[in-house]
Amino acid sequence: GAGVSQSPSNKVTEKGKDVELRCDPISGHTALYWYRQSLGQGLEFLIYFQGNSAPDKSGLPSDRFSAERTGGSVSTLTIQRTQQEDSAVYLCASSLMIYGEAFFGQGTRLTVV
Amino acid sequence: DAKTTQPPSMDCAEGRAANLPCNHSTISGNEYVYWYRQIHSQGPQYIIHGLKNNETNEMASLIITEDRKSSTLILPHATLRDTAVYYCIVNAGGTSYGKLTFGQGTILTVHP
């Protein structure tokens, strides 16, 4: 596709369940980023990948959060044992090079009930 | 990352220039200034970035002061569709690049 694609666009899950959020970056983009945005709040950095490696995981809020990227393309953000405070819009972005612009997807709206 | 300071909100009349200021007094020599905007319910959109020279593209102009401690984003002819939250970010690139730190931004409202 032409842009960053995220799926699902909306996810409602029960507290305690695991969820997987998927990001398809723009083809050829080596850098991929995950952010989350709680209602009415700014964007919170979670993690970024350069190729398949994640140099900086310090933004992950707890050990319930993990992310991987395979083949230098698709990335999956996994949240285990979801809590209500995990409810937010999870945004993915990719960029061609480290000093260039980052293109954002439309996000996955996660609601934990 | 250097901290940025932006006014929480601004208004602009349609068709007029919108000038959005940003202070980044602790910016380092290798840090770039980036501007993004977020229209309601959408992902952020890149606008422009620069290091020390003024930059212009089809969306906007970026004016960076000589001491690099502040900058101004200029939308030359604002339209209603430019109503959004505008974020000013400084980032050094390299291993810290991905950690674009978004502050609260400036809510720009363009009115008829």
Image (tube, rainbow, N blue to C red):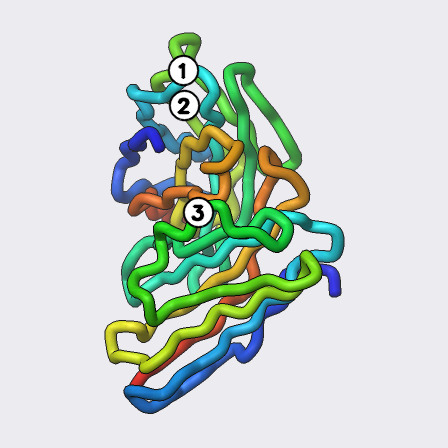
Question: Tags 2 and 1 in contact by the CB under 8 Å rule?
Answer: yes
Identify the residue under disc 1: B68
Residue displayed at 68% across by 57% down: A72
Residue at left offset 59%, top offset 41% = A101
Is there CB contact under 8 Å for labels 2 and 3? no
Q: Nearer the viewer, residue A15 or B41?
A: A15
Which residue appears at 70% of the width and 61% of the height?
A71
Label 3 amino acid? Asp
- From the image, tell me which residue sits under label 2: B71
Residue B64 in picture, x, y percent from top left = 45, 18
Residue visible at 25% across and 79% down in the picture: A84
Q: Secondary structure at mark 2?
A: strand
Question: Which chain letter matches label 3?
Answer: A
Q: Quadrant of the N terminus of chain A?
A: bottom right
Observer-nearest of A29 and A89: A29
Same subunit under labels 2 and 1? Answer: yes
Judge from the rendering whether residue B73 lies leftward or rightward of residue B27; answer left or right: right
Q: Which mark is residue A56?
A: 3
Marks 2 and 3, how far apart in space? 28 Å
Closer to the eye: label 3 or 1:
3
| Amino acid type, mark 1 | Arg
User: Quick one: label 2, few (<14), some, or many (20+) residues within 10 Å?
Assistant: many
